[in-house]
Image: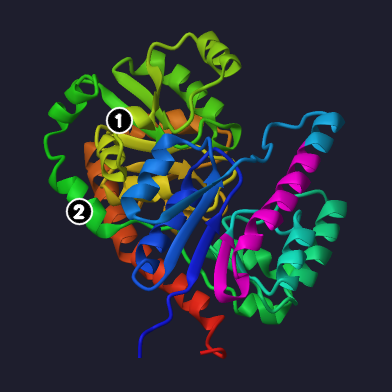
Amino acid sequence: MTKIRRKLIFFWTYLEWGGAQVYFMAIMKEALKDWDVIVILPRNSSPEMIGFLRQIGVTIEFIDFVIDLGQAPTIKRKIERQLSRISCEIKTLRFLKQYNLNNSILHIEAAPWQSWQFFVLLAMRKANVFVTMHNAINAAKWRESVWTARMQLLSRLESFHIFASNKDTKEKVRYLVTQEFWEKIPVTYTCVNPPQIRTVLDRTDDIASLRAKHGLSKNEFIVLCVGQFIDRKGRWVFLDAAKIIQTEAPDVRCVWLTPVESTKDEKAKIEKYGLNNFEIRLSSTVGSSREEVLEFFRVADIFALPSYVEGLPIALLEAMALGIPSISTNIFAIPEAVHDSETGLLIEAGDARGLAEAILKLKNDPELRQTIAKQGSEFVLSNFDEREAARIAIRHYEECFDDAD
């Protein structure tokens, strides 16, 4: 009997891309065997992101609206952002009218505790909706109470589903939803692709040549961070640490690889640091495929991600899998992968001095670097395989149609 090929639709309304999209792409690659996979995103999205999707072979459709995710320091800006969100949700509902949603899966990037009415309306259309939560919500008590009431409502809807991308998030979601709903939430880890990691390792043995290709000195000790250059990733902590290190170890170079070019204001603030050991690079300039971007990781002696807020960042897992000794913060789900002094080093969020000391500790102890690199790689490759996470996700998609089939 021929298996029915249903539609699996991934949808987001923002321009920036990062770990959430890499997580989605892992599911897409596995799902294409049995599903028609459609990705819907804004027309002016990063050409790099669009290129990655085309390499996978999914169908891409564009929308002509974008949500406002800019900072909201004033009441006026907060109102503008809320209106933008509501407008995008209305336009999304209109756009999705072209699909038979009760015969499809819609995996959408949106915050259900904010957009609860949007998800209720989708449920009224009998849409099978999935949302992945990468970290727990953090809000003032009064707002937390409101959000909990909304999530309690959503968790009673038969067609609404949540994936947690790590154990920490699942545990912290417990109080938001009904107990029955919580027990059914699967953990679909943010993960790495082991065959892809092996391919990158096999073709990047000559680190000196790789550095020369990217204009980096073979004699420098390189500390790499990868991710959006934003506050929650600890960007200014990274620069503060670079400033400390600049005087203590002038052969250290700190590099931040990001998918988005810095704004004029950001560049001005960076300039004020007066650093000669720091640079930002755009990921689009180091390669046009995921493998080429991962190859660039290999220029690093150390990977450092001093985030304030994270789930379990894919860039960190990829660096560890590639055998790069890694430093990150003792927050949220990061300790699920980084076991201090075993698979990596942990520091406290916001501690620039601690980051600088951890970098210098690894720099001055080659044996420790080697041990952490080996144990970190083995642990990630053994426990965070994106193919298994994707299979768990797809199995839960399929359960939506078990009764119908």
Tag in front: 1 or 2:
1
Outermost residue toward the front in this view: 98
Task: Residue 116: give x, y in percent of width and height.
Answer: 77, 60
> Residue 176 location in percent, x, y?
74, 67
Q: Is residue 182 above or below residue 362?
A: below
Identify the residue shown where x is 34% and y is 70%: 33
Tell me if I can see residue 316 in this picture: no
Residue 264 position within the rendered picture, expressed as x and y whole percent measured from the top left: 57, 14
Q: CA distance from mark 1 to mark 2?
A: 19 Å
Q: Secondary structure at mark 2?
A: helix
- The residue lying at 79 percent from left, 42 percent from top is 82
Which label was assigned to residue 137? none
Numbered badge on residue 198: 2
Which quadrant would residue 254 be assigned to in this image?
top left
Q: Which residues are magenta?
A: 81-107
Q: Is residue 93 magenta?
A: yes
Magenta part, dominant SS: helix
- Amino acid type assigned to the residue bearing label 2 in the image: Arg
Q: Which residue is mark 1?
A: 286
Q: Amino acid at mark 1?
A: Val
Q: Position of residue 193 (x, y in %)?
A: 31, 57
**Residue 247 seen in the current view:** yes
Residue 96, quarter of picture = bottom right
Toward the viewer: 4 or 195? 4
Disc 1 crowd, CA 10 A, few/some/many (<14, 14-19, 20+):
some
Left or right of 324 in this view: 130: right
Quadrant (top left, top right, bottom left, bottom right) of the N terminus:
bottom left
Other-residue count near label 2 (Cα within 10 Å), few / some / many at <14 / 14–19 / ≥20: few
Q: 52 or 153: nearer the eye?
A: 52
First in sequence, mark 1 or 2: give its number: 2
* Foreground of the two, 395 or 342: 395
